[in-house]
């Protein structure tokens, strides 16, 4: 077999599929540590070598093959731990298509699971007995979940690995259906082929610089592309070990992530912007005892918008633990490109620009020349690698725009997925786009941004989320940040701003949550009025209504992005649990 230390896109072609790469890893590094699970983010309760990974994956695969799951869609409904990882590898080895999903805990999430089952035409679900017992009543009420074959992971005999049969796949077979989180629309199943997984593994090594000397730590949900592809698959592809903890373990006590990085002298981790904020907000003086982040050389901020203030606060606070500012940088990616598209290089400090707001509203990235000018800080998400081509185009005409002009981001590269499952119309309009100059085909991302003269990519928002008021473009993120900073009673990162058309005019609504400690003492009417006045002052936008909702109801994706389109739907359908509100009297005759 080939040496994976010299793997390239050409060498990948010498393997049959992505699973064969992992099996080769077991042959060449069988005794090396692959994964360690930290129960509650603290205690080691399981450790697998690459040989153990291979053995468990073959056992699960043999079971799946025996019940006819080869080339079928298999949902994974489990806690985000090492068993989830093994279930995914088992699907790969069996020749099945894994469908990564969350374990539903609300009626809405159960309905979403039913939507995924129906769309994927799935016949099998891998879960655990305790999860199935909790879901039993809701399954009985959900038509799509009644007749599906529920596989109990706990009851699969690991000794059956000898019954595994080589699946005889090729690189064009679909390895994964990654259902989008639905930040702007209904979830769609991205078809990720074995070729896409191989290409992104090599691409990540190029732009992030991973190697076998690295050590990773991840708490990201494996139902999400960032948690699965970067957190789990990359370490198996490259051949370095990774510590795994659950998202709950991190959210309960964020310092556990940093302690794991310190205890294992880990070098690699990618998390969303909010995770860095949580660490700064929750760190205590005693947490710094024996905390050593000097080996943490790749701290990728992997969810837009990357905030300059977040990067500065994190580097300032954790400098005393040996953290190097050059380790922290931005990255941009999406499920439709399997994961990463651009990244700040490992040995480079992140770049940022302070842009003139009035110019930015017109789609021009112009640096401010005076401290008196109103500005917006934007952080670079780095550059693409050699195999990826980026274009910034006018969203309406698809004409290519020059540097420092804001437009929609188009992508072309080997990691670009094959399209959406069972959705040929949207696939064609998203994955097979040609520019006005007839170059392509490109993937149309729906994201807005610009390239500077150095080729660095800056993200400015989403096309569908853009708020247009009085002929000017406004980023909802800027409005949300203004509302959040207006009063300490408003929960950080729990604000959603969107617009909708009502009687021939576009009106803006702000949804926000109130901190628990302020609930009894704050007047929602006064607070709503304060938010409106601040937004009018900062952005010259009249707000139709400020709505304060029950804690946890502001909808977000699994990577922490605000779901503004979902917020709009919930607002128009009156689905929020309202704690309080204030409606602008200038719109008193406007009904919703």
Image (tube, grey):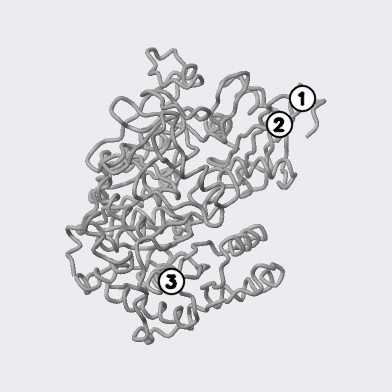
Please identify, in this view, whether the residue under mark 3 or under mark 1 is nearer the observer: 3
| Quarter assignment of residue 500 | top right
Provide residue 291's location: percent of width, then percent of height.
29, 52
Please give the residue where the numbered disc 1 appears in the rendered image: 587
Provide residue 77's location: percent of width, then percent of height.
53, 68
Number of numbered discs present? Answer: 3
| Quarter assignment of residue 364 | top left
Mark 3 vs mark 1, CA separation in Å? 54 Å
Residue occupying the point 31% across, 73% down: 48
Residue occupying the point 18% across, 60% down: 5
In front of the other: 588 or 534:
588
Q: Is residue 538 above or below residue 142?
A: above
Q: Is residue 176 above or below residue 502?
A: below
In front of the other: 254 or 174:
174
Mark 1: give few (<14), some (14-19) or many (20+) Cα within 10 Å.
few
Q: Secondary structure at mark 2?
A: strand
Q: Earlier in the sequence, mark 3 or mark 1?
A: 3
Please give the residue where the numbered disc 3 appears in the rendered image: 87
Tell me whether circle 3 and circle 2 mark residues in contact (CB < 8 Å): no
Mark 1 vs mark 2, CA separation in Å? 9 Å
Please give the residue where the numbered disc 2 appears in the rendered image: 545
Mark 3: give few (<14), some (14-19) or many (20+) Cα within 10 Å.
many
Q: Earlier in the sequence, mark 3 or mark 2?
A: 3
Mark 3 vs mark 2, CA separation in Å? 46 Å
Instruction: Say if residue 281 shows up in the picture.
Output: no
Q: Image check: 363 left or right of 43?
A: right
In front of the other: 272 or 113:
113
Tell me whether circle 1 and circle 2 mark residues in contact (CB < 8 Å): yes
Provide residue 477's location: percent of width, then percent of height.
53, 33
Q: Image check: 505 left or right of 337?
A: right
Q: Which quadrant would the N terminus be assigned to in this image?
A: bottom left
Instruction: Say if residue 38 shows up in the picture.
Output: yes
């Amino acid at each position: 077999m080939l040496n994976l230390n010299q793997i390239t896109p050409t060498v990948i072609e010498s393997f049959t599929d992505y699973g064969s790469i992992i099996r080769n890893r077991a042959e060449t590094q069988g005794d090396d540590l692959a994964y360690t699970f930290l129960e509650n983010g603290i205690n080691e309760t399981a450790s697998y070598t690459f040989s153990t990974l291979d053995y468990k994956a073959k056992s699960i695969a043999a079971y799946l093959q025996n019940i006819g799951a080869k080339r079928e869609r298999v949902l994974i409904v489990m806690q985000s731990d090492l068993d989830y990882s093994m279930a995914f590898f088992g699907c790969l080895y069996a020749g099945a298509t894994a469908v990564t999903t969350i374990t539903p805990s609300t009626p809405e999430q159960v309905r979403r699971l039913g939507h995924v089952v129906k769309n994927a035409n799935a016949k099998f679900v891998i879960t655990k007995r305790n999860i199935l017992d909790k879901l039993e009543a809701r399954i009985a009420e959900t038509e799509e979940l009644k007749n599906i074959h529920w596989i109990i992971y706990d009851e699969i005999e690991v000794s059956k690995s000898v019954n595994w049969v080589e699946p005889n796949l090729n690189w064009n077979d679909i390895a994964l259906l990654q259902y989008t989180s639905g930040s702007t629309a209904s979830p769609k199943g991205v078809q990720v082929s074995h070729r896409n997984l191989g290409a992104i593994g090599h691409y990540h090594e190029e732009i992030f610089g991973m190697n076998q000397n690295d050590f990773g730590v991840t708490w990201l949900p494996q139902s999400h592309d960032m948690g699965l592809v970067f957190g789990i698959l990359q370490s198996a592809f490259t051949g370095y070990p990774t510590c795994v903890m659950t998202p709950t373990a991190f959210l309960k006590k964020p310092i556990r992530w940093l302690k794991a990085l310190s205890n294992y002298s880990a070098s690699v981790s990618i998390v969303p912007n909010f995770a860095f904020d949580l660490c700064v907000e929750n760190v205590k003086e005693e947490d710094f005892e024996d905390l050593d982040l000097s080996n943490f050389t790749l701290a990728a901020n992997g969810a837009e918008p990357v905030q300059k203030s977040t990067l500065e606060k994190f580097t300032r606070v954790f400098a005393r633990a040996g953290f190097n500012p050059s380790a922290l940088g931005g990255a941009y990616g999406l499920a439709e490109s399997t994961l990463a598209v651009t990244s700040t290089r490992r040995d480079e400090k992140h770049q940022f620009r302070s842009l003139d707001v009035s110019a930015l509203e017109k789609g021009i990235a112009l640096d401010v020349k005076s401290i008196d000018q109103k500005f917006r800080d934007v952080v670079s998400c780095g550059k693409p690698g050699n195999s990826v081509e980026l274009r910034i185009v006018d969203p309406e005409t698809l004409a290519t725009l020059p540097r420092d002009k804001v437009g929609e981001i188009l992508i072309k590269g080997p990691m670009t997925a094959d399209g959406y499952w069972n959705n040929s119309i949207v696939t064609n309009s998203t994955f097979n786009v040609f520019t006005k100059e007839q170059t392509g085909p490109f993937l149309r991302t729906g994201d807005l941004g610009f390239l500077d003269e150095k080729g660095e990519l800056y993200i400015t928002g989403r096309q569908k989320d853009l708020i247009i008021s009085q002929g000017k473009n406004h980023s909802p993120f800027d409005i949300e940040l203004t509302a959040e900073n207006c009063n300490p009673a408003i929960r950080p990162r729990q604000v959603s701003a969107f617009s909708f058309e009502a009687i021939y005019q576009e009106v803006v609504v702000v949804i926000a949550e109130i901190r628990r400690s302020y609930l009894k003492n704050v007047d929602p009417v006064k607070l709503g009025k304060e938010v409106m006045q601040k937004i009018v002052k900062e952005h010259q936008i009249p707000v139709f209504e400020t709505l304060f909702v029950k804690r946890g109801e502001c909808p977000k994706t699994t990577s922490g992005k605000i779901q503004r389109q979902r917020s709009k739907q919930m607002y128009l359908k009156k689905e929020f649990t309202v704690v309080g509100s204030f409606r602008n009297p200038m719109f008193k005759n406007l009904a919703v």
